[in-house]
Image: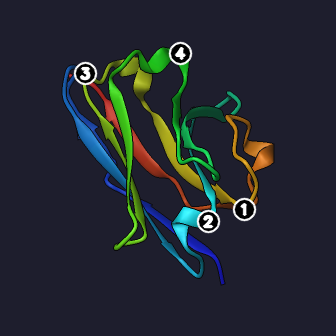
Amino acid sequence: EVQLQASGGGLVQPGGSLRLSCAASGFAFHDYAIGWFRQVPGKEREGVSSISRRDRHTYYAYFVGGRFTLSEDNAKNTVYLEMNSLQPEDTAVYYCAADPRGGSFFDHDYTYFGQGTQVTVSS
């Protein structure tokens, strides 16, 4: 059974950092596209970052602006999203997702989603 477990969210002050983790079970990360998404109440879920299935190239949404870094640890079957210089507008529930196809920033292109982890940026 494919499962994704996101963790690492919390409350942080503006300018602070968090590292989100997404632990996978039931499949091998390196065979799947991986995506991070976020959602605030009343808005659609939006793509934050992704790793493509084939060449493992990483992609970031325009609003990331060089502040986030996506990485993976194949030995732990875990993907990380290092988030720096966090701002109040980054407040959202963050989700990780996986799909055996190519990957994208659109949540409808992903088959598996984990439960979200809340990130709150506030002073």
- Residue underneath mark 1: 100
Residue 69, position as x, y percentages in the image = 35, 35
Q: Is residue 39 above or below residue 51?
A: above
Which amino acid type corresponds to the residue marked 1 in the rendered image? Pro
- In the picture, measured across the screen, residue 111 lies left or right of residue 118, that is right
Instruction: Give the distance between the C-alpha atoms of the residues marked 4 and 2, in whole angstroms.
Output: 26 Å
Residue 74, position as x, y percentages in the image = 40, 67
Q: Tell me what residue is drawn at x 72 percent, y 62 percent.
A: 100
Which amino acid type corresponds to the residue marked 3 in the rendered image? Ser
Residue placed farthest to the right in the image? 108
Q: Which mark is residue 48?
A: none
Q: Tell me what residue is drawn at x 28 percent, y 46 percent.
A: 19
Number of on-image labels:
4
- Residue underneath mark 3: 85
Is tag 1's residue or tag 3's residue first in the polypeptide sequence?
A: 3
Which amino acid type corresponds to the residue marked 2 in the rendered image? Asp
Q: Secondary structure at mark 3?
A: loop
Q: Secondary structure at mark 4?
A: helix
Q: Which mark is residue 62?
A: 4
Q: Depth check: 17 or 89 in front? A: 17
Q: Tell me what residue is drawn at x 29 percent, y 24 percent.
A: 86
- In the picture, measured across the screen, residue 106 lies left or right of residue 18, that is right
- Residue underneath mark 2: 31
Q: Depth check: 44 or 100 in front? A: 100
Is tag 1's residue or tag 4's residue first in the polypeptide sequence?
A: 4
